[in-house]
Image (cartoon, rainbow, N blue to C red):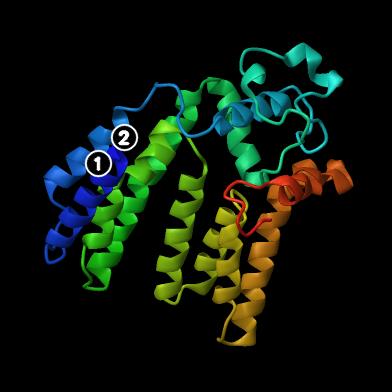
């Protein structure tokens, strides 16, 4: 209930700011403060962050997370308190290659705080991009204010450390590039977002619509190079690259009205 009330207040505040030209300092301070408050607290909403950390540790030890599920006996020597909190330990990873790179970096700071801080920065980056879009197109600031104050982005980013926030940042950046007719940059940003969470890949198709064939060819080659470079370290998994995703697609049933 409190979250719904918070969301309603965020919506009302955003609407009141619809005619302002600069993001109010009060909004910015509340946005930063609300996110900082969650840093270091136990993750809420889900336990995904523990799999992120575990898969980073697995990579650092020289194992491929697309091949070795957390419960694999080959990883017995790596098991620790983080491993004990990994959900579905019998399923290999389903996270794309660029997300895996982030996981590997997290092994150097083996704590949920790494992803909470990353989510916080990406989330505030989304606010910045929305402000930039409003200024460049003489549009209302209400989307930036709404995102800055709404509880869901806060709970997903600095509270839960979800990587969706980073993918959304890249998606918004891709949209801005596409609106400026910078199609290759937009496609590359969308592809990067898709290498974190798959959905942003849809924007690559938007970037390829219209325009001269030479430009479309250049965009396809650039995206192909990015995807290849990101995937190359994991290609040894072969068919196992898709095992985790296939398991998720078949068995996932959260909010299952459509799934059933």
Estimate the x, y position of residue 245 in percent, counting from the top left. Answer: 74, 48
The vertical placement of 181 against 187, above or below, is below
For the C terminus, the image quarter is bottom right
Q: Identify the residue at horizontal 42%, vertical 60% (top origin).
A: 172
Q: In terms of depth relative to the viewer, which is nearer, 162 or 59? A: 162
Can residue 191 be spotted in the picture?
Answer: no
Residue 198: quarter of image? bottom right
The vertical placement of 249 against 73, above or below, is below
Estimate the x, y position of residue 181 in percent, counting from the top left. Answer: 44, 77
Q: CA distance from mark 2 to mark 1?
A: 6 Å
Q: Identify the residue at horizontal 67%, vertical 23% (top origin).
A: 57
Estimate the x, y position of residue 247 in percent, counting from the top left. Answer: 77, 45
* Left or right, residue 134 beside residue 110: left
For the N terminus, the image quarter is top left
Q: Identify the residue at horizontal 60%, vertical 24% (top origin).
A: 107
Under circle 2, the secondary element is helix
Query: Tags 2 and 1 in contact by the CB under 8 Å rule?
Result: yes
User: Dot 1: within a 10 Å radius of its alpha carbon, few (fewer than 14), some, or many (20 or more) residues?
Assistant: many
Q: Identify the residue at horizontal 64%, vertical 86% (top origin).
A: 213
User: Dot 2: within a 10 Å radius of its alpha carbon, few (fewer than 14), some, or many (20 or more) residues?
Assistant: many
In this figure, which residue is indicated by the disc labeled 2? 35
Number of numbered callouts drawn: 2
In this figure, which residue is indicated by the disc labeled 1? 31
The vertical placement of 186 against 250, above or below, is below
* Left or right, residue 5 beside residue 247: left
Under circle 1, the secondary element is helix
Can residue 79 be spotted in the picture?
Answer: yes
């Amino acid at each position: 209930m409190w979250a719904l009330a918070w969301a309603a207040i965020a919506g009302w505040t955003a609407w009141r700011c619809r005619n302002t030209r600069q993001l109010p300092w009060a909004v910015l301070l509340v946005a930063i403060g609300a996110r900082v408050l969650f840093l270091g607290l136990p993750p809420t909403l889900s336990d995904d962050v523990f799999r992120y950390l575990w898969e980073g540790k697995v990579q650092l030890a020289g194992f491929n997370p697309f091949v070795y599920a957390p419960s694999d006996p080959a990883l017995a020597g790596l098991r620790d308190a983080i491993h004990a909190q990994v959900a579905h330990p019998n399923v290999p990873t389903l996270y794309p290659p660029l997300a895996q790179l982030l996981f590997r970096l997290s092994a150097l700071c083996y704590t949920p705080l790494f992803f909470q801080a990353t989510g916080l920065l990406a989330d505030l980056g989304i606010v910045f991009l929305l402000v930039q879009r409003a200024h460049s197109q003489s549009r209302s600031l209400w989307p930036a204010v709404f995102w800055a104050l709404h509880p869901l982005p806060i709970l997903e980013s600095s509270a839960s450390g979800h990587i969706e926030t980073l993918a959304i940042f890249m998606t918004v950046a891709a949209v801005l590039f596409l609106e400026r007719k910078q199609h290759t940059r937009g496609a590359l940003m969308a592809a990067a977002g898709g290498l974190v969470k798959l959905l942003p890949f849809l924007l690559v198709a938007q970037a390829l619509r219209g325009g001269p064939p030479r430009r479309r060819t250049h965009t396809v080659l650039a995206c192909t190079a990015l995807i290849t470079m990101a995937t190359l370290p994991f290609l040894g998994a072969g068919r196992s690259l898709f095992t985790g995703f296939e398991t998720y697609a078949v068995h996932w049933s959260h909010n299952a009205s459509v799934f059933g």
